[in-house]
Amino acid sequence: PGGAIVVPAGWLVPQPSGPPDKHDLAIIVEAPPAGSPDSSLYRVIVCNAGDGAELHPASPAQPPKVKCKAALVLKDIPKSKVTDTSWWLLFLLPYVVPSRTNNAMRTYDRLCFLTGTTLEASMAVTIDDPHSDWRSRHRAGIEFYGNLRVALQYLLRRAGLDRAAWKLFSYHYRVQMVRMLQTDLGNRAILSLGDAERRLIAMATDHLAYTSAKISLDMPAATAAAVMDAANKLVDTVRSLSSAKTGAATSSLLPVLDLESGQDRQAGATLLPLFDGFVRDVDIAGLEGPVTQPPLLVPVDNLLIQRATTLLEALAALRFADRTCSLIDNQNSNLKFAPFLKVAILQHLFTKALPLPRTPDKHARHD
């Protein structure tokens, strides 16, 4: 009673070459607490801040960002539905079998079986859940990692951790991850780093620097200075260790290395391939997938809506505004702050471009 499990889910879309495109979700299934008046009603929380998060509740309360409820809460689900193996088979099948028909909408539509109503009606009931925080969507392709963080955040908030404590926990979590990088880079037997490894290190250190600057805004000046100084020292140390790994990557003939000093002990001896790099348990060759072409983007020019002085010019301004809003809507995934762009266009159209009608009082003074 009161326990919770995290179930991986999502969908796979086949690609012309290489592995299928993978979209991950984290599903929390939460049992009713002990002593609950109805012990047969469960909760299911869909954790997603990547592809498909546009189906979650969204809010423009902090412009120019449009934040979403990354943890979508569905409550009052009967135990008979949560334990329905046929539904779980249907829900998890797209995560195992790639298909071109797999997408976010089809996956979320299957959730309606649990609540017996539409997804919108279910969201309206739990939109004010205090443990599901508003947050920005992920823009990097890190859905598996990011959605697990969303699930961890919800579980900790549900257990009593407030938002300020979660931010501090998230900061220390990043610090620990970067310290693990520092330990790995301190191994003298590692002579070189690949491009992917250097990008990973750069991303981890950038995120730590950003997080330290963000949480320091809510701290006293002395504490904020200490946090920023510690983060900067750790970031500089990791980056300097990464820059020092300039040895040429080799594949077959490697010298025997003294793991303590990093010095050659017997030149020309044969060791394991890629012994001087990070340990990998699986072969990653080919997992990078095909080259992703940049999306085609039709430019949107809001300045073409000119002030109208005739009926024909007013009709032309209306048609152009309608075309521009349609263009923004069709390119929503490639444009930042698309809802705000449409609001700005319509505001300019009706307050600046189109002539305002006369007031009922014909003798009123017009400025």
Image (cartoon, rainbow, N blue to C red):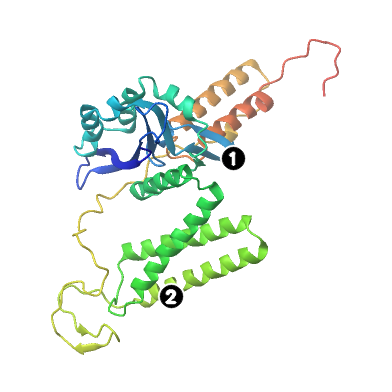
Residue 207 visible? The answer is yes
Is 26 on the left-hand or right-hand side of 134?
left
**Residue nearest the viewer, comparing 357 with 190:** 190
The image shows residue 76, relative to residue 249, as above or below, that is above
Residue 24 visible? The answer is no
**In the rendered image, which quarter contains the C terminus?**
top right
Q: Residues within 10 Å of mark 1 (few under 14, many from 20)?
A: few
Is 100 on the left-hand or right-hand side of 118?
left
The numbered mark at residue 62 is 1
Q: Residues within 10 Å of mark 2 (few under 14, many from 20)?
A: few
Mark 1, secondary structure of its residue: strand
Q: Residue at x 20, y 39 (%)?
A: 96
**In the rendered image, which quarter contains the N terminus?**
top left
The image shows residue 314, relative to residue 56, as above or below, that is above
The image shows residue 324, relative to residue 291, as above or below, that is above
The image shows residue 119, relative to residue 211, as above or below, that is above
Residue 193 spot, x, y in % from top left: 31, 70
Instruction: Give yes or no for contact between labels 1 and 2 (Cβ–Cβ under 8 Å).
Output: no
Which residue type carries mark 2? Ser
Mark 2, secondary structure of its residue: helix
Which residue type carries mark 1? Gln
Q: Residue at x 28, y 50 (%)?
A: 291
Q: Earlier in the sequence, mark 1 or mark 2?
A: 1
**Residue nearest the viewer, comparing 323 with 347:** 347
Question: Alpha-carbon distance for marks 1 and 2?
Answer: 37 Å
Residue 292 spot, x, y in % from top left: 31, 47
Q: Which residue is mark 2?
A: 240
Residue 157 spot, x, y in % from top left: 48, 44
